Image (cartoon, rainbow, N blue to C red):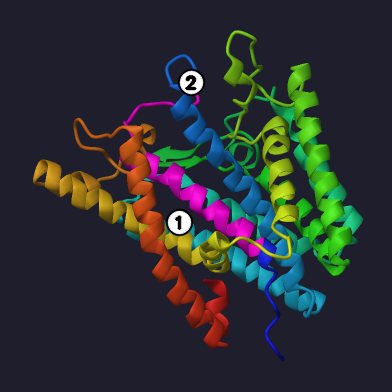
Amino acid sequence: MTPRARIESIDVVRGAIMVLMALDHTRDFFGIPGQNPTNLATASAALFLTRWVTHFCAPGFFLLMGTGAFLAGRRRSGGELSRLLATRGAWLIFLDLVVLRCLVYQFNVDYRVTMLLVLWALGWALITLALVARLPIPAIATTGVVMIAGHNLLDGIRSANPLWQVLHAPGVVFNASGHVVFAAYVLVPWIGVTMVGYAIGAAYAWPAERRRRFLIRLGLALTLAFLLVRGLNVYGDPAPWTHQRALSFLNTTKYPPSLAFLLMTLGPVLLALAWAERASPPKWFRPLFVYGRVPLFYYVVHFAVLHLLATVVCLMQYGSAHWMFESPDLGHYPFSPPPGWGFTLPVVYLAWATVVIVMYPLCRWFAGVKARSRAPWLSYL
């Protein structure tokens, strides 16, 4: 069987997501600890917008993972696809809780603070898709839309039940004997986004122009729906906006992702997918193609590069880097910052550019390895 041709518009949008995502993670490692970029009473407009522009990353990645899951099933039976999605989902959960947690985020194995983050939620989303992939596309799409649009109806429920906090309300899942597990990425809305992405994958069997019109119309509809829902200020986000703070209109809730947050971000992502299908993409797109072809490799390695870079800077500034190997508290995740640690936004942007540039030859090399090899295990990286 010949390798399936890649869909470059998906790769380029996914690559752009990876580049933006690195900005947020660079701010985590090099920004000033304790600064809350979404607190408009204390954050500058530049800091808020630095955080806001990265909001498109997680929704875009969950959506495109669902689309990729559909495309992976085009040459597989229903059973083969379900097995593939289930095993990949289990691998992502293991990767998040063991490999990233121990070897990348904190450079230790004490498990004092464990955050259930993106790969954790992506893993469960794939496992859910494995269970529903044989259902009709309209049923999967409808279920996803209901999960996205309706989960804010549950915001009034207050429960300390760990299962509830994993599914809907971020919070502490376990706290005993000096070990804390905190669910940051709850499952219900993110699984909904993945299901919608899976349903959108069916459009990639259509003629290109029809698909492009569909993506444009759907993207515009979601963007207009965001303006309506957010403008009414009644439902769709637990944090209402105020006329006194103009940026509060954009300051939607990510944890858990509100209806307004997902409308705000998914609409432009769909428009970007349509735009990326142009016949002659600019030359500066080429690095984005490379990043988008190996997103999991990029995700894991860029965290290691960031942590190593922070360790080198710490050694140069303090003469020691023991903080970089110590578990943080929940307020300073993903690492324990030294006293006085933190840099201004221009330095953060410089560190971000450095990481993105370093990642390019690494991703290009690994993309070549995957293109040349038919080893099944490479599909998990």
Left or right position of 253 against 173: right
Q: Position of residue 85 (x, y in %)?
A: 68, 68
- Write down the residue under mark 1: 97
> Mark 2: which amino acid?
Asn
**Range shown magenta:** 10-39
Q: Can residue 112 be seen from the camera position used here?
A: no
> Exactly how many numbered labels are in the figure?
2
Q: Residue visible at 44% across and 29% down?
A: 47
Q: Position of residue 335 (x, y in %)?
A: 31, 43
Whether 305 is drawn above or below 269: the answer is below
> Mark 1: which amino acid?
Leu
Q: Residue furthest left?
A: 319
Q: Residue furthest bottom?
A: 1
Q: Nearer the viewer, mark 2 or mark 1?
A: 2
- Dot 2: what SS? loop
Q: Residue visible at 87% across and 47% down?
A: 142
Q: Quadrant of residue 265?
A: top right
Q: Main secondary structure of the magenta part?
A: helix
Q: Nearer the viewer, residue 128 or 245?
A: 245
Q: Quadrant of residue 245?
A: top right
Q: Earlier in the sequence, mark 2 or mark 1?
A: 2
Q: Which mark is residue 39?
A: 2
- Dot 1: what SS? helix
Q: Position of residue 246 (x, y in %)?
A: 60, 16
Q: Residue furthest top?
A: 244
Q: Which mark is residue 158?
A: none
